[in-house]
Image (cartoon, rainbow, N blue to C red):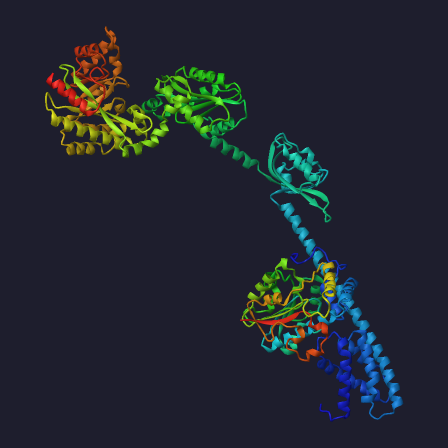
């Protein structure tokens, strides 16, 4: 709409502008002032028309007042300013040329009606908005209440359906609510739990802190605690639980309820106990095992002042032989019987028996007076072993060696104590077995643990700590040196020279015997080669080398031997391999085959320690042996004169038997001239022993042989 | 029905609400006496508070029209409060028919009221959710139905961030929202600040204390701190400025002095 300058339209626009400028600062509209002016313009037009209308009609100015509210000019000031504006400018800009008096009167009435319309509209709007916001608040509350209701229902479902037992009690311990899981844990009877008091739930196995924690919680001094707790079920059985109790406070922070969550651990506990038992007990004998023993020993050694301990470390004598000859099943039965007997020896409180492994057992006694008790304990054990064990119709004699360690708690670690006991036991064994020895720190220091030696063996071979001594074999008929037995020694860096009895069993056990044996064979064969080069008379010297059971079964035995002989340029006849009788007990053809091959090549095979095992004379025919070496036990009684006639008869019989089988007989341990003479008369072929020479370096033998040759 | 995470344990209308106070400042009657009492108390310190609110509304109106002019048809208004007049969907539709709007607020009463106001509106809806849980907003049914996040969105954070304390990490909440928006999206933001208030500092603090008393602390931030909310977005001319200076349609000199309190700005996702 274009407005001619100062025409009615232009004047109307100017009125609207003035109006908008007056009102804009007190409105809260987000419109700009020009935009507001555009909204006011039609209102101004209606006022202008109403001003000049023939008759007064209140509806139009009322509508204008209401429209002001609609344009968000709701502030009371907006009305005041609008009315001011109408009063001052409406007649001026929109009155045109009408009668001033009438226009003024009309203008006043318009203002009254405008004010009424504004007030009415504002009241309507205010009420409507109040209604709307109240409704919104109600709706929101309804939504929240509904949500709460739903969440409560869900929590109820969680409570009821939980696999974990849930109970709520007041601070006096009265149980208010329990869920199904908790009722089921107690065996299903509701009356067993509902309506009862927490304090009735004491159990003999309650840890001391359980009820202290409870008291702290209900007093509000503790928010929660977690314990393992047992309960009596109505049927008398025990329910074990993981129990968590929490304090519930009201919104003001005051303690209100206690909440218990419990998990049934009865089954798991039983399983744990069983697993624990299995982990700490020996499956064969049912005795506590090494683990449990160490736990106990550790506890004992950590005990306070005045407490002492006594330890018996038992190793059966000759158990390996029983196992080897009668089989493992018999060996196991023997161990079970021994375990039972040991158990009956240590029944006092503070005493315990354990099996450490194999045929090794320990018995432990504790208290202030172990000094005396441990000797008694050892004596009881020795005594318990006296009666033979009957297995598969045989009466087996069981002997054992015991190492005793006794002392105050708090001085040594379990490992040190056990090591000392082990050393001491070994000392008892070395002294012939079937006895007990008391630990002696000095002896300990000198002693060599089997363990230490075993671990040092491989490096010892690499470092060349082994050497060989040779003990001459002398022909009894003419006293000439016919050869020597090679005896391996270990020059141990700490312990000095060790004989084969100290380390060969260990080497056997670890398999190191194979390389060690090969090394001994190599050295010995080379040595005999040297001897043979240097003195051929009166007969070529020969060398005896021991073969351990392990080497016997080693597949490379024949090839190794052939290689070694060839490399040294020594003929097979120069070599005699000594095999113990016990190694060949029950030997089948597979085991004998390599020996046979060696024998066929010309290597002599000697049966060592003859007469100590379960000698099976009938078996002799089958074996590819050409020499019997009589055990020294037969010749010992001949050191004196006159010799025991029974021994003489036995030796005579063996010699005669051997010769009839075309076997030569060698005797060991000849220490006196009388002995030598006796053995010569009995028909033995060769002998060795201190009477002739102790084992020594290779040159000694060379000298002996020379003396012999010249003498 | 699941209890939404935002829902309080109960609605307590004896506690003032910032959205109803805002409504009161804007001349509305969607409020209760507690709200008016708090509002009057704050106005004792800062009589011009309604003018600041009005300037916020005016800025929002300009910004929405700017966004619509830039081709944006989707609007996400977080902290929308009580719908009164000149609401985003009205302004947006006026500029661009068919524009879609999702309002977000965590005040259950504001949400309930918005639901009534928006009843029958196919292209506008409201979500009850918390700004601090952007995933709840972005994954809501309403956003899923009305807003295509592959296309530009105008995200409105008008007069809301100054109600989030630093310990609640508003920056990462905003970052998570802005990161979810497509290139070309706009971030429309206003924030209260001591800068620009035409009063001695002590007086303005009195008003801030009122909000502290009603457990809706008002966090005044500096211009630099406010600018950090736009990280990753390019500022649209004229940058972060007092509200009347942002693309004014009338002379800023004509504005009420209180309208210059705080800052407003629009950023664009590149």
Where is residue B200, by image quadrant?
A: bottom right
Q: Residue at x 79, y 85 (%)?
A: A46
Q: Say if residue A193 shows up in the picture.
A: no
**Rendered view: A517 above or below B240:** above
Q: How many marks?
A: 0
**Rendered view: B231 above or below A168:** below
Quadrant in the picture for the C terminus of chain A: top left
Quadrant in the picture for the N terminus of chain A: bottom right
Q: Say if residue A475 shows up in the picture.
A: yes
Residue A3, percent from left and from top: 73, 91
Nearest the viewer among B185 and A452 is A452
Q: Is residue B199 left or right of residue A491?
A: right
Nearest the viewer among B71 and A157 is B71
**Rendered view: A369 above or below A34:** above
Residue A281, percent from left and from top: 47, 29
Nearest the viewer among A149 and A668 is A668
Q: Is residue A129 left or right of residue A308?
A: right
**Rendered view: A622 above or below A515:** above
Where is residue A498, by image quadrant?
A: top left
Where is residue B4, by image quadrant?
A: bottom right
In the displayed image of the protein, which residue is found farthest to the top?
Answer: A642
Nearest the viewer among A322 and B26 is B26
Residue B248, percent from left and from top: 66, 78
Residue B102, percent from left and from top: 63, 68
């Amino acid at each position: 709409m274009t407005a001619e300058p100062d025409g009615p339209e232009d004047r109307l626009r100017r009125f609207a502008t003035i109006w908008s400028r007056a009102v804009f600062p007190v409105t809260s509209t987000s419109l700009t002032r020009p935009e507001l002016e555009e909204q006011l313009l039609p209102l101004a037009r209606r006022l202008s028309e109403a001003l000049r209308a023939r008759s007064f009609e209140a509806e139009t100015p009322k509508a204008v007042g209401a429209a002001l509210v609609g344009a968000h000019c709701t502030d009371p000031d907006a009305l005041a300013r609008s009315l001011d504006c109408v009063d001052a400018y409406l007649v001026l800009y929109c009155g045109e040329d009408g009668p001033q008096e009438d226009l003024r009167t009309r203008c006043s009435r318009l203002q009254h009606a405008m004010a009424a319309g504004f007030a009415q509209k504002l009241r309507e709007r205010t009420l409507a908005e109040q209604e709307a916001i109240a409704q919104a608040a109600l709706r929101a509350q309804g939504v929240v209440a509904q949500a709460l209701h739903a969440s409560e229902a869900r929590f109820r479902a969680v409570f009821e359906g939980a696999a974990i037992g849930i109970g709520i009690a007041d601070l006096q311990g009265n149980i208010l609510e329990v869920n199904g899981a908790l009722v089921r844990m107690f065996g299903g009877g509701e009356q067993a739990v509902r309506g009862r008091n927490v304090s009735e739930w004491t159990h003999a196995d309650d840890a001391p802190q359980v009820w202290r924690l409870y008291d702290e919680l209900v007093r509000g001094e503790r928010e929660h605690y977690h314990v393992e707790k047992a309960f009596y079920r109505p049927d008398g059985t025990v329910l074990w639980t993981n129990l968590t109790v929490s304090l519930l406070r009201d919104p003001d922070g005051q303690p209100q309820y206690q909440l218990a969550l419990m998990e049934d651990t009865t089954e798991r506990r039983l399983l744990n106990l069983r697993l624990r038992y299995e982990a700490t007990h020996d499956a064969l004998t049912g005795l506590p095992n090494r683990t449990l023993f160490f736990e106990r020993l550790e506890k004992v050694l950590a005990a306070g002042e005045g407490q002492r301990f006594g330890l018996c470390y038992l190793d059966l004598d000759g158990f390996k032989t029983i196992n080897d000859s009668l089989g493992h099943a018999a060996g196991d039965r023997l161990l079970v019987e021994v375990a039972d007997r040991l158990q009956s020896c240590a029944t006092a409180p503070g005493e315990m028996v354990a099996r450490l492994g194999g045929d090794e057992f320990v018995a432990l006694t504790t208290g202030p007076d172990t000094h005396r008790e441990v000797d008694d304990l050892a004596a009881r054990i020795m005594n318990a072993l006296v009666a033979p064990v009957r297995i598969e119709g045989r009466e087996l004699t069981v002997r054992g060696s015991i190492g005793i360690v006794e002392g105050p708690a708090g001085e040594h670690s379990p490992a040190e104590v056990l090591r000392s006991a082990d050393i001491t036991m070994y000392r008892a064994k070395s002294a012939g077995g079937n006895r007990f020895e008391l630990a002696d720190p000095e002896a300990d220091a000198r002693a060599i643990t089997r363990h230490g030696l075993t671990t040092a063996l491989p490096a010892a071979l690499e470092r060349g700590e082994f050497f060989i001594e040779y003990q001459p074999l002398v022909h009894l008929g003419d006293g000439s040196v016919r050869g020597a037995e090679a005896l391996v020694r270990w020059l141990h860096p700490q312990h000095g020279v060790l004989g084969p009895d100290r380390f060969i069993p260990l080497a056997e056990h670890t398999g190191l015997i194979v390389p060690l044996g090969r090394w001994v064979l190599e050295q010995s064969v080379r040595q005999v080669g040297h001897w043979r080069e240097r003195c051929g008379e009166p007969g070529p010297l020969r060398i005896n080398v021991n073969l351990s059971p392990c080497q016997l079964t080693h597949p490379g035995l024949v090839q190794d031997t052939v290689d070694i002989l060839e490399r040294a340029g020594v003929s097979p006849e120069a070599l005699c391999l000594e095999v113990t009788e016990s190694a060949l007990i029950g030997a089948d053809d597979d085991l004998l085959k390599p020996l046979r091959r060696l024998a066929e090549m010309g290597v002599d095979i000697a049966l060592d320690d003859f007469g100590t095992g379960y000698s099976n004379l009938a078996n002799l025919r089958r074996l590819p042996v050409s020499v019997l070496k009589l055990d020294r036990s037969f010749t010992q009684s001949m050191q004196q004169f006159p010799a025991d006639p029974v021994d003489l008869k036995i030796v005579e019989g063996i010699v005669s038997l051997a010769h009839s089988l075309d076997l030569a007989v060698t005797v060991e341990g000849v220490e006196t001239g009388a002995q030598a003479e006796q053995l010569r008369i009995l028909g033995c072929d060769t002998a060795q022993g201190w009477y002739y020479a102790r084992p020594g370096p290779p040159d000694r033998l060379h000298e002996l042989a020379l003396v012999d040759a010249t003498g | 029905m699941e209890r939404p995470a935002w829902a309080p344990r109960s609605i307590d209308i004896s506690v003032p609400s910032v959205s109803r106070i805002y409504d009161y400042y804007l001349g509305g009657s969607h409020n209760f006496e507690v709200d008016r009492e708090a509002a009057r108390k704050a106005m004792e310190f800062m009589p011009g508070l309604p003018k600041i609110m009005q300037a916020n509304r005016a800025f929002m109106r300009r910004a929405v029209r700017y966004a619509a002019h830039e081709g944006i048809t989707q609007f996400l208004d977080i902290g929308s409060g009580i719908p009164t007049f000149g609401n985003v969907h009205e302004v947006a539709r006026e500029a661009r028919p068919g524009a879609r709007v999702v309002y977000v607020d965590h005040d259950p009463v504001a949400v309930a009221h918005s639901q009534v106001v928006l009843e029958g509106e196919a292209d506008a809806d409201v979500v009850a959710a918390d700004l601090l849980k952007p995933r709840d907003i972005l994954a809501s049914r309403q956003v899923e139905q009305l807003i295509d996040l592959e296309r530009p969105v105008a995200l409105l954070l008008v007069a809301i961030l100054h109600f989030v304390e630093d310990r609640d990490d508003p920056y990462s909440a905003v970052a998570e929202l802005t990161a979810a928006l497509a290139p070309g999206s706009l971030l429309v933001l206003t924030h209260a600040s001591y800068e620009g208030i035409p009063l001695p500092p002590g007086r303005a603090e009195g008003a801030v204390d009122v909000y502290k008393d009603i457990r809706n602390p008002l966090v005044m931030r500096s211009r630099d701190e406010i600018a950090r909310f736009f990280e990753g977005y390019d500022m649209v001319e004229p940058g972060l400025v007092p509200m009347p200076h942002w693309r004014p349609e009338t002379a800023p000199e004509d504005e009420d002095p209180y309208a210059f309190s705080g800052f407003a700005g629009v950023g664009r996702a590149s």
